[in-house]
Image (cartoon, rainbow, N blue to C red):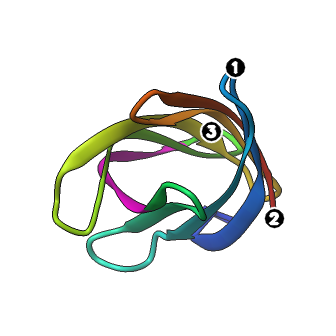
Amino acid sequence: MAGALTSGTYRGLGSSPLGSADLTLELDLLSSPKQVTLTSPTAGRFRLDGQVTPESGGTYLSGTLVNDQGVGLGTIKAHVTPSRVTGTAGIGPAQWQLDLRR
């Protein structure tokens, strides 16, 4: 697939009723297994334990966000395009609407 999304770093704000958070999503879809991490300066770093599904115009991410000890602490459902990430992610009580840019 020409121009397929394989890697990238996206940064921006996740907004929620509890307030916004600076978030960074990093993708490495060429590695095996595929690596997807979400980092928040306040909540920490989490990796995706779930599905990475190609879709028209990008990639769909869904599954559990786990910490370095392998404990599932949240979820993510996000659409990733070459320029933007939209969707939702949550750690504990914080559930963010994602608006991240490359």
Going by the image, does 78 lie left or right of 53? Answer: right
Looking at the picture, does residue 67 appear above or below residue 100?
Answer: below
Q: The magenta stretch spans which residues?
A: 45-54
* Amino acid at pointer 3: His
Between 51 and 44, the residue placed more toward the observer is 44
Q: CA distance from mark 2 to mark 3?
A: 13 Å
Q: CA distance from mark 1 to mark 2?
A: 25 Å
The residue shown at (66%, 26%) is: 18
What is the quadrant of the C terminus in the image? bottom right
* Amino acid at pointer 1: Pro
Nearer the N terminus, badge 1 or badge 2? 1
For the stretch drawn in magenta, what is the main secondary structure? strand
Measured as percent of width and height from the top left, residue 39 is found at 54, 63
* Amino acid at pointer 2: Arg
Looking at the rendered structure, the secondary structure element under dot 1 is loop
Measured as percent of width and height from the top left, residue 55 is found at 57, 39
Q: Label 2, on which residue?
A: 102
Asked if residue 8 is among those painted magenta in the image, a careful observer would answer no
Residue contact between numbered discs 1 and 2, judged by CB atoms under 8 Å: no
Give the image quarter of residue 15.
Answer: top right
Q: Nearer the viewer, mark 1 or mark 2?
A: 1
The residue shown at (65%, 39%) is: 56
Between 47 and 3, the residue placed more toward the observer is 47
Q: Label 1, on which residue?
A: 17
Q: Label 3, on which residue?
A: 79
Looking at the rendered structure, the secondary structure element under dot 3 is strand
What is the quadrant of the N terminus in the image? bottom right
